[in-house]
Image (tube, rainbow, N blue to C red):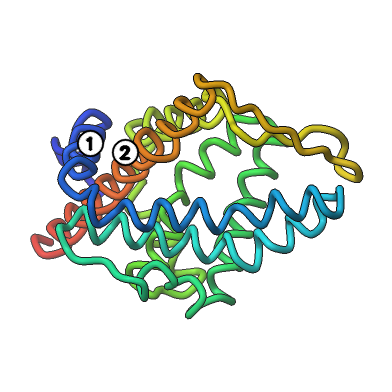
């Protein structure tokens, strides 16, 4: 798919930021709801001292919630209203949600284990598979196929946005920290002022901005694909 001059990292980041600022009031309840959905993970670690229940909870609850939040970002970037049904979208198509998310994760992990670069390329190619499922209600294969079409000539522009997201996850502080082995993790809390401020900025400003930027990229590339198809 030929690349539009508007399909660039800077354009997506700028569009994501502008939309984040404009749509923060309707977005904020969903951001707070996401943090509320994450809290049981902390209790599970504290209660059972194992990741097993955390993994199960993540697959059952957080995976569909994350997919639904992608739809919220997509619709808000289009300046459309987003509601509870959109936020819970992943539960209505749960088998496909789980299959697409697990497939994307395993493909990326397999590529990273092999030679690192293939894993990065695979993720950049199929990063919109979950967006396609949430937005277009596509099947599993169709979700990956649509993502591959959208990202065919845009992986280089997507890389900085995704890299910023990864760096934000790694570099910013966490109020709740988990350490230890897989079989015996421990939960610790850090309530220093800087930690609270940094964590709040991450979950309420920086990550939502970057997520909105990914929605801007998806919407922009989807629009370019539709225009190319119409002009063919």
Residue sitting at x 61%, y 59% = 103
Query: Label 2: how many residues lie within 10 Å, few (<14), some (14-19) or many (20+)?
Result: many
Q: Which residue is mark 1?
A: 17
Outermost residue, bottom direction? 92
> Can you see residue 124?
yes
Residue sitting at x 46%, y 75% = 139
| Left or right of residue 110, residue 221 in this image | left
| Left or right of residue 174, residue 138 in this image | left
> Can you see residue 114?
no
Query: Label 1: how many residues lie within 10 Å, few (<14), some (14-19) or many (20+)?
Result: many
- The relative height of residue 114 versus residue 93 in the rendered view (above or below) is above
Q: In the rendering, at what x and y percent does residue 216 appear?
A: 25, 46
Compare residues 10 and 41 and report the one nearer the observer: 41
Element class at badge 2: helix
Q: CA distance from mark 2 to mark 1?
A: 5 Å
Q: For residue 71, what is the image quadrant?
A: bottom left
Element class at badge 1: helix
Tell which circle, 2 or 1, labels the residue nearer the N-terminal end: 1
For the C terminus, which image quadrant? bottom left
Q: In the rendering, at what x and y percent does residue 23 appear?
A: 20, 50
| Left or right of residue 2, residue 98 in this image | right
Q: How many marks?
A: 2
Q: In the rendering, at what x and y percent does residue 193 appear?
A: 51, 21
Compare residues 219 and 69 and report the one nearer the observer: 69
Asked whether the residues under the numbered discs 2 and 1 touch, taking CB atoms below 8 Å apart as contact, a structural biologist would say yes
Q: Which residue is mark 2?
A: 209
Residue sitting at x 18%, y 39% = 15
Q: In the rendering, at what x and y percent does residue 213 appear?
A: 29, 41
Q: For residue 104, what is the image quadrant?
A: bottom right
């Amino acid at each position: 798919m030929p690349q539009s001059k508007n399909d660039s990292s800077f354009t997506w980041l700028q569009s994501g930021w502008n939309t984040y600022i404009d749509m923060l009031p309707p977005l904020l309840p969903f951001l707070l709801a996401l943090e509320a959905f994450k809290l049981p993970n902390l209790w599970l670690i504290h209660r059972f001292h194992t990741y097993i229940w955390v993994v199960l909870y993540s697959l059952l609850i957080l995976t569909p919630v994350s997919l639904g939040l992608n739809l919220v970002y997509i619709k808000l970037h289009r300046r459309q209203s987003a509601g509870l049904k959109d936020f819970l979208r992943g539960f209505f198509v749960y088998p496909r949600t789980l299959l697409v998310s697990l497939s994307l994760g395993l493909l990326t992990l397999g590529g990273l284990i092999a030679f690192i670069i293939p894993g990065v390329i695979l993720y950049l190619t199929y990063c919109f598979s979950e967006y396609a499922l949430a937005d277009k209600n596509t099947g599993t294969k169709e979700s990956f196929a649509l993502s591959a079409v959208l990202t065919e000539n845009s992986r280089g522009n997507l890389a900085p946005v995704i890299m910023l997201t990864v760096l934000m996850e790694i570099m910013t502080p966490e109020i709740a920290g988990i350490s230890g082995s897989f079989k015996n993790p421990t939960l610790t809390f850090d309530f220093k002022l800087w930690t609270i401020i940094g964590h709040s900025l991450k979950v309420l400003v920086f990550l939502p901005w970057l997520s909105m930027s990914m929605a801007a990229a998806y919407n922009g590339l989807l629009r370019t694909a539709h225009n190319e198809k119409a002009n063919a």
